[in-house]
Image (cartoon, rainbow, N blue to C red):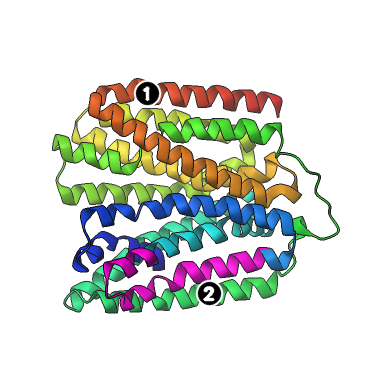
Amino acid sequence: MTYEGARGVSGAYLKILEGTALVAGAVTVGEFLGYLMRFFSGYLADRLRSSRVLWGLTVVGYLTNLVAVPALALAGRWEVALALFLVERLGKGLRAPARDVILSEVVEGIGRGKGFGLHEVMDQVGAFSGPLLVMFVLSTSGEDYKLAFSVLAVPATISIAFLLAAYTMYPRVRSVSPKKTVVGGGLGRKFNLFSVSLALMTAGYLAWSLVSYHMKECGLVSDPEISLMYALAMGVDALIAFPVGYFYDKAGLKSLIITPILASIIPVLLLNNTKITAYLAAAIWGAVMSVYETNMRAAIPDLVDAERRALAYGTYGLIYGAAWMIGGVLAGAIYTLNPSYLIPYVLVTEASSLIVMSYLLKTA
């Protein structure tokens, strides 16, 4: 609720503070910095091997991530606001690997797929309700952004309170027990194959910015409908997250095959240039994101030793972020040449991902 509420109006707030379009675009730099921070955080947790370090990274990450948002109310210049948006992403990157290691342990009793599925459902509930809260405050206060960001301190405080309560209930993380030693080297052949498949899959998964750009360019739907389609995608993400996680608990790594198949359908539907196929493309886009946030994360503990989970989650975040950035640039360049070229590009990348994934399943 806290950071998604702020991100929804980030561009508008920077405009009010007299920032340029370039400044608004620079907010995306935080995404990649956040993924770099995930790798650093995962590596640090893997080296230091302490429950206190793991929880410390999680708590500090949440504090940084969530405190930066209400602080936007005090930003009188766009430079300060931009810095806070970047700090918020760094905080999210710092906490993510450590949080996922802890989460992978505490949900073992109900199944990792269902556990990560529930986590994604709650994440999307916040992603939906946070912007609604900001919209309500802005519409009833004469567009007082300082008040809107100040109000977001309430869910942030509640979140930190629940996090600290979780720490008191589960202070010792087994996978980083000092009694366990870690053998040097990489993360193993299975994880390497998974990483190659992930990189290809992500490079072919069209970014929403390009999807919405095409809708605007071709006049498929109105601007409000584009926003509605994104809400639809997020709704689908939340709706299927738990069933998708349940599917992982039943089928294991085999459930991942659905991801490149669904991603390859998106450009075919989108470039059909009809309203109904555009809505279908948005729904499938949300479904793919749901699998990423649920089953992909649930798969990590099945691919590496328990002692290497922190590093594996950090590496996963780095590969995902880099492939997302490179794929977005490539897809944008291809679209500029000819939008129809996106179909073979996506089919080749997703088919390659599927081949590597199939080989992983065979060897695993």
Query: Looking at the image, which residue is at 52% across and 50% down?
Result: 36
Marking on residue 160: 2
**Counting residues from the N terminus, which is met first, the one under dot 2 or under dot 1?**
2
Q: Residues within 10 Å of mark 1 (few under 14, many from 20)?
A: some
Query: Looking at the image, which residue is at 41% across and 31% down?
Result: 204
Amino acid type for the residue under numbered disc 2: Ile
Element at badge 1? helix
| Residue where numbered disc 1 is placed | 345
- Which quadrant would the N terminus be assigned to in this image? bottom left
Q: How many marks?
A: 2
Query: Looking at the image, which residue is at 20% across and 30% down?
Result: 273
Tell me the CA gap for discs 2 and 1.
43 Å
Closer-to-camera residue (341/354):
341
Does the residue at mark 2 contact the one at mark 1 (Cβ under 8 Å)? no
Question: Over which residues does the magenta segment extend?
Answer: 54-83
> From the viewer's perspective, is residue 99 above or below residue 288?
below
103 left or right, relative to 130: right
- Which quadrant would the C terminus be assigned to in this image? top right
Q: Residue furthest right?
A: 179
Residue 10, how many percent across, how many down?
29, 62
290 left or right, relative to 133: right
Amino acid type for the residue under numbered disc 1: Tyr
Determine the image quadrant of residue 77. Answer: bottom left
Query: Looking at the image, which residue is at 64% across and 38% down?
Result: 252
- For discs 2 and 1, the disc positioned in front in the rendered view: 1
Closer-to-camera residue (214/262):
214
